[in-house]
Image (spheres, rainbow, N blue to C red):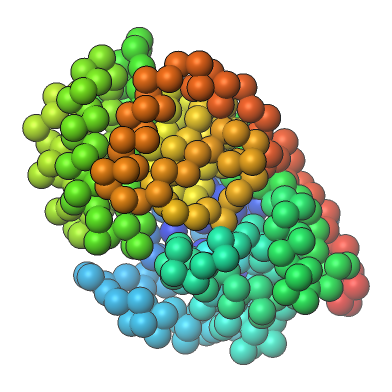
Amino acid sequence: MKKRIVLAFGTRPEAIKMAPVYLALKKSQALEPEILLTGQHRTQLEQALEIFGVPHSRNLDVMTERQTLPELAARILPKAAEAFREMKADYVLVHGDTLTTFVSAWAAFLEHIPVGHVEAGLRSGSMSEPFPEEANRVLTDALCDTFFAPTEGARDNLQKCGAAAKRVFVTGQTAVDAILFASKRGKLPDCVPQTGRVVTVTLHRRENWPVLAPLAACLADVARAHPDWTFVFPVHLNPIVREAVMPALSPCPNVKLIDPLEYGQMAALLARSTLILTDSGGLQEEGASLGVPVAVVRNVTERPEGVDAGIVTLLGNDPSGAMKAFSGLMDDEERIRRMARSKNPYGDGYASDRIATALEARIAELL
């Protein structure tokens, strides 16, 4: 009888990175995967699953308007525990660093269900950057049975924290699997020119909220100074983000402020871009996978491999300093070419298959 593996996640980035894992598990003769959504994101999440043809079993639909993090955690915990019982989960997989990740792992732990952590071991070294994601990762890893580390550096972080070496598997990053799949199938948004230089922009991280408005104002200055570049900014649906960035950037004719894209379109946009300007974690990996240089509006990153490889650069989040540095990068064509030639340190597109193989072996041990 196949063992039931419940993949629990709630945001679009998690859906993108877990869909290839689901597809790999579906090929197993020993495992039966099912998906539980918390609904931390809604339409965006389901659109991401659609491009992979991945169904979900149920959605906890936990979100309410302007919900605080403690309120969200309090809603996820009992609902996830009940769902795991009703779904008769033999094993739970979570991904990355969201509140869904930690609370779902905690719920499974309290139900005596072993947990595997996909994208385990990433560390920035600062509990406040990214916030609360760094804490979510550390707390999740403390609860887990098995760890799927995307890089050797992540493996080393886990072992420094006491994870048993035989429970840590270096698999590569499932984001690479996903972006290579989607970039060949997505359609470029209509607002993106077929020729010329393009910057994809995303800014939304919680620790940057206090400086989002001045960041947007400084970015508007950069856009005005580079009228031959097109800036495409899929703006996060969070009203705090939209209220901060849209007033300064709306008047700029070469800045295209659009709603979040479905994943195939976003993958096509990234592949078309000359540069990516972001505070996202996942876009660092996706840019590296597509050979597109990434400038990160953060002080630290839990994905240092891209910086070491040369395809990612940290700008900090001081608005004036960060945008001055980014403007300098835009003007340095040789540096852009050099960054784009860097080797992708995050994987080869087969991470999900390695996870499925490792999980089969672990389940066999537990029988």
Q: Residue 360 vs residue 109: left or right?
A: right
x%, y% of residue 252?
14, 29
Q: Residue 121 vs residue 297: left or right?
A: right
- Which residue is painted at 59% across and 51% down in the image? 303
Q: Nearer the viewer, residue 280 or 263?
A: 280
Q: Nearer the viewer, residue 188 or 327?
A: 327
Query: Can residue 38 be seen in this snapshot?
Result: no
Q: Quadrant of residue 264?
A: top left
Query: Can residue 311 be seen in this snapshot?
Result: yes
x%, y% of residue 280?
44, 49
Vertical relation: 60 (above or below) 278: below
Vertical relation: 213 (above or below) 198: below
x%, y% of residue 270?
45, 30
- Which residue is painted at 44% across and 69% down in the image? 128
Q: Quadrant of residue 147?
A: bottom right
Q: Residue 327 vs residue 10: left or right?
A: left
- Which residue is painted at 58% across and 82% down in the image? 106
Say which quadrant the C terminus sits in: bottom right
Say which quadrant the N terminus sits in: bottom right
- Which residue is painted at 50% across and 39% down in the image? 313
Total numbered circles: 0
Vertical relation: 47 (above or below) 90: above
Vertical relation: 146 (above or below) 277: below
* Residue found at the far top of this picture: 195
x%, y% of residue 204?
32, 53
